[in-house]
Image: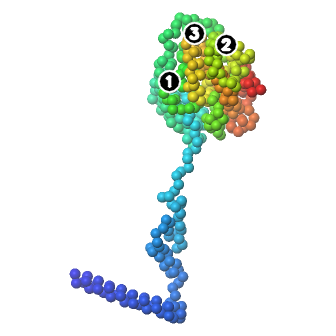
């Protein structure tokens, strides 16, 4: 076996030597004789294959990658920018505000909450490249059913938070006998939620504590959404970025008058606060919206706060912090029935310049029993499903005309 292998190897060497001599003679004759060269010329495709062979195996190293196409013998060159190894970083993600959607809800309101979320998601949030997160707050732990059903309908992240007891329940220093008398007086006058302590808890929480919740600390903007509300129009822009880009701080859709018996002592308290802290009053404020007589009396106008798009930094400010502390110390969230709508509205009208407050006329919105429906071109552009004639803007106790007067 060893002999046979050695013999084959020797024969191969002789064959290679003979082949080399023949090829050398062929090259010499090609150079010396034109007749020989023409008679032994290879077809053109052989030259192409030869060139390709040389390119693939004998070209000098470079920063380019040479690829032989299976359907062609021509070279295709990938530049560094086309080669995945040298691809540039992906384009930055679409701009997004540091914002959240927030809802205060109870477990028993699960279907009303789902309905509101669906409206918001279908009309705005779901269409975004990066949807805004949701925060749900409750004074008792959410059930697993509530959380799972909400997770099924939101398009972005969602968090569920428990409200601290000290931020929700009636403080211990409230005189319950006096508070009971106050509730009874409002019952006799037929005022809505007159007898509800829970409603008063909610108003106080929304006035001075919601923005202090730990889940909101990482955000700058919020959009308040309540159970069982409707959004009628598609939004083709980001309201948060609109607020940010245009230096707005507070946005609304519906205005109205408050029930005077619920806030009898609110304006006297505010007037004293203004006298004690003139440094907090904005130079170009919206006093004209909340008072017909330059602050002597309150005209009861407020922004309906179940819809708000606003800056959390506004509430975190020294002015608002001091303002709420003064109001809370009176106990009149319980002795009367101070609502978060007039509390927010008075603060925004006094501490912000009027240019920092925005009417979202193109946002179709309903909170029973009132709604704002965009008019004309805004209704068409938003593909709104509301009837333009069913619109609270200039009817009943609406204060929208008062708001427009601020800019006249």
Q: Which residue is mark 3?
A: 335
Which image quadrant for residue 181? Answer: top right
Evaluate if marks 2 and 3 touch, with contact meaning CB atoms under 8 Å apart: no
Quadrant of the snapshot with the C terminus: top right
Q: Residue furthest front?
A: 279
Q: Is residue 176 left or right of residue 242?
A: left
Q: Is residue 274 above or below residue 387?
A: above
The residue at the point 70 percent across, 13 percent down is 297
Q: Which mark is residue 56?
A: none
Q: Position of residue 384 (x, y in %)?
A: 68, 35
Which of the marked residues, 1 or 3, is nearer the chain's N terminus?
1
Asked whether residue 370 appears in the rendered view, the answer is: no
Marks 1 and 3, Cα distance to the nearest angstrom?
24 Å
Q: Is residue 45 left or right of residue 2?
A: right
Q: Residue furthest right?
A: 408
Which image quadrant for residue 306? Answer: top right
How busy is the neighbourhood of tag 3: few (under 14 within 10 Å), some, or many (20 plus)?
many
Q: Which mark is residue 138?
A: 1
Q: Is residue 340 above or below residue 311?
A: above
Q: Position of residue 164 (x, y in %)?
A: 47, 21
Q: Nearer the viewer, residue 287 or 400?
A: 287
Q: Is residue 317 above or below residue 80?
A: above
Which of the marked residues, 2 or 3, is nearer the chain's N terminus?
2
Q: Position of residue 387 (x, y in %)?
A: 71, 31
Kindly state the secondary structure of the residue where label 2 is placed.
Answer: helix
The residue at the point 52 percent across, 9 percent down is 174
The residue at the point 64 percent across, 23 percent down is 351
Kindly state the secondary structure of the residue where label 1 is placed.
Answer: strand
Give the number of marks.
3
Q: Which mark is residue 260?
A: 2
Asked whether residue 331 appears in the rendered view, the answer is: yes
Marks 1 and 2, Cα distance to the nearest angstrom?
29 Å
């Amino acid at each position: 076996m060893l002999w046979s292998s050695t013999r084959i190897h020797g024969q191969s060497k002789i064959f290679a030597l003979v082949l080399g001599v023949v090829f050398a003679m062929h090259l010499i004759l090609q150079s010396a004789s034109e007749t020989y060269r023409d008679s032994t010329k290879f077809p053109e495709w052989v030259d192409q294959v030869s060139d390709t062979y040389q390119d693939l195996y004998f070209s000098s190293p470079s920063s380019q990658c040479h690829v032989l196409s299976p359907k062609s013998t021509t070279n295709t060159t990938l530049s560094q920018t086309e080669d995945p190894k040298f691809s540039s970083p992906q384009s930055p993600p679409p701009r997004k505000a540091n914002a959240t959607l927030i809802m205060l809800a109870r477990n028993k309101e699960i279907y009303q909450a789902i309905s509101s979320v669906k409206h918001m998601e279908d009309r705005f949030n779901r269409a975004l490249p990066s949807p805004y997160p949701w925060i749900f707050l409750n004074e008792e732990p959410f059930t697993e059913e509530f959380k799972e059903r909400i997770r099924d309908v939101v398009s972005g992240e969602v968090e569920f938070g428990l409200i601290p007891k000290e931020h929700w329940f009636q403080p211990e220093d409230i005189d319950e006998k006096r508070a009971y008398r106050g509730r009874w007086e409002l019952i006799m006058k037929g005022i809505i939620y007159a007898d509800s302590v829970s409603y008063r808890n909610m108003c106080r929480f929304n006035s001075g504590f919601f923005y202090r919740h730990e889940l909101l600390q990482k955000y700058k903007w919020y959009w308040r959404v309540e159970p069982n509300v409707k959004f009628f129009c598609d939004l083709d822009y980001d309201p948060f970025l609109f607020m940010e880009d245009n230096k707005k701080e507070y946005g609304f859709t519906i205005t109205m008058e408050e029930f005077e018996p619920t806030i009898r002592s609110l304006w006297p308290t505010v007037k004293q606060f203004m006298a004690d802290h003139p440094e907090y009053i904005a130079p170009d404020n919206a006093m004209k919206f909340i008072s017909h007589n330059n602050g002597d009396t309150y005209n009861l106008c407020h922004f309906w706060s179940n819809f708000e798009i606003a800056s959390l930094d506004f509430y975190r400010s020294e002015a608002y912090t001091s303002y709420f502390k003064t109001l809370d110390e009176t106990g009149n969230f319980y002795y009367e029935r101070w609502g978060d709508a007039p509390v927010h509205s008075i603060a925004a009208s006094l501490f912000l310049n009027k240019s920092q407050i925005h009417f979202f006329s193109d946002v179709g919105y309903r909170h029973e029993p009132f709604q704002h429906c965009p008019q004309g071109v805004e209704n068409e552009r938003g593909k709104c499903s509301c009837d333009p004639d069913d619109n609270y803007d200039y009817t009943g106790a609406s204060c929208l005309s008062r708001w427009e007067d601020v800019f006249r």
